[in-house]
Image (cartoon, rainbow, N blue to C red):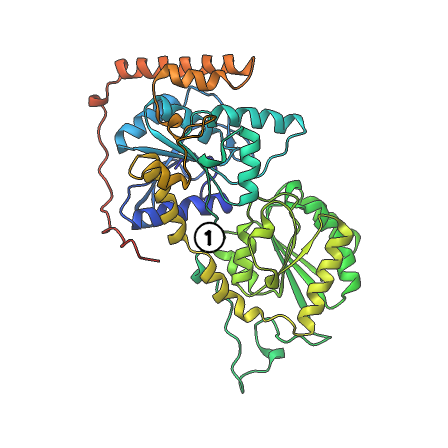
Amino acid sequence: MVCDFFYPQPGGVESHIYQLATKLIDRGHKVIVITHAYEDRKGIRYLTNGVKVYHVPFAIIYRSSTFPTVFSFFPLFRNIIIRERIEIVHGHATMSTLCQEAILHGRTMGLRTVFTDHSLVGFADAGSILTNKLLKFTLSDVDHVICVSHTGKENTVLRAALDPLMVSVIPNALVSDDFKPLPRPEPGSLPFAQHPLPAHPLGPDDILTIVVVSRLFYNKGTDLLTAAIPRILENHPNTRFIIAGSGPKAIDLQQMIEQNVLQDKVEMLGPVRHEKVRDIMVKGHVYLHPSLTEAFGTVIVEAASCGLYVVCTAVGGIPEVLPSHMTVFAKPEENDLVAATGRAIAALRANKVRTERFHEQVKAMYSWTNVAKRAERVYRGISGDISEDDFYGADISNASHWSATRGRNFALIDRLKRYYGCGVWAGKLFCLCVIVDYLIFVFCEWWWPKDKIDIARDWPRKPPASNDDE
């Protein structure tokens, strides 16, 4: 697994990589993670269950993404791959420089490659056009692509000009036991007013708490949240907010709180560790998610598992995540977000929503074990352990515009043909990059042969889980 975004930094991509790696190890596979160094994380670290993490020393330029060098990562990457006897390179996240470079180098070394896209990117602005062109470069020679939602799949297929057959949808999940709601008080115990849990049912004068756990960036809808909070509190005086997260937009929220004198109504907690998220969520009744773009939105699954009624914007893959009885959808507009939050508050105060049932329902819907089994099937498919008809679920023998075997040929001339078709000028530039990458590989093979590289000792493996293990 290769990605710039990994622990100790919290986030959905980071959690996805860790949980998937852990479950694959439980199923008998060997998994290592390559990411960049953090201030207190350098070199090699071991995480729970034997997940081995390489923190490589590369400079960070923007939002935890490393400076793109294209080639300087290759010698170190080759050394790690040979030391650990890796067979498949699985890159995560469009915005991760290490991911894009690892897929290129992996193909040059003759390894199978998989890419998982966790985000949605537009088509109109200059940044999106450049990002999509680079993604087209990376995915021109990848074996398979995974997206976390059907909306994400459509977006990735259009951005990288892929055949839909080579893109699978495998959603995120959660560890449901880590996101349990607090137990409801038993009859005859402390009254609701004295109990430390959110009060259900809510009376007209009971305090209702709205929780927000998010990175405070523009694309997460922080501007929308800043505009909506004063109006929500004005319409519903017996309401308060708890906001957890950090980012450049935090100053805007703090200024809004001071200008509207809402210090007793809005509590900002700053950055929180992922293991503390549940403790924050169980303090609330409603989870507010005003994101402007989202491929999946794991945090809303976590909120529902904690027994919160979810108010979220109907953007990207969010409408696919939870059933309608757990959510109130809003347009990504201030007025509609305020109205949707008001509807959620009214429904809870009228006791029309049975949030105590959400946890078991979410637990039945999402499982990391299931995600690992589906990812394992992708690995088997690109390795040839499954027939192409079974793997792709379609008769591909007559597909003249694309053959499923196109990503399986490592011959340099065939790789160059695929890159050459990426554009009049871009195609030639991509071919030049691949040729230079291949020359670096040949030089490394001569300068530092494989038999001169020590093989790392493996972490003791668990017996593989049975195929019917859920």
Which residue bears the numbered disc 1?
Answer: 173
In the visual, does 340 lie left or right of 64?
A: right
Along the viewing direction, whichever of 195 and 336 lies nearer the viewer: 336
Question: For the view shown, which residue lies furthest in the front direction?
Answer: 398
- Residue 254 locus on image (x, y percent): 71, 49
Q: Which three-letter amino acid code belongs to the residue tagged 1?
A: Ala
Picture residue at 53% right of the left edge, 39% below the top: 153
Q: In this view, does 163 lie above or below 236?
A: above
- Residue 87 locus on image (x, y percent): 30, 33
Any part of residue 9 in sight: no
Question: For the view shown, which residue lies furthest in the left direction?
Answer: 451
Along the viewing direction, whichever of 266 and 439 lies nearer the viewer: 439
Along the viewing direction, whichever of 326 and 52 lies nearer the viewer: 326
Residue 32 sits in which quadrant? top left
Picture residue at 59% right of the left edge, 62% below the top: 326
| Image quadrant occupied by the N terminus | top left
Determine the secondary structure under disc 1.
loop
| Image quadrant occupied by the C terminus | bottom left
Q: Residues within 10 Å of mark 1 (few under 14, many from 20)?
A: many
In the visual, does 307 lie left or right of 406?
A: right
- Residue 121 locus on image (x, y percent): 60, 35
In the visual, does 217 lie left or right of 65?
A: right
Residue 405 sits in which quadrant? top left
Q: Is residue 84 above or below residue 315?
A: above
Question: For the view shown, which residue lies furthest in the bottom direction?
Answer: 188
- Residue 265 locus on image (x, y percent): 71, 61
Picture residue at 31% right of the left edge, 34% below the top: 383
Any part of residue 51 in sight: yes
Count of all numbered marks drawn on residues in the image:
1
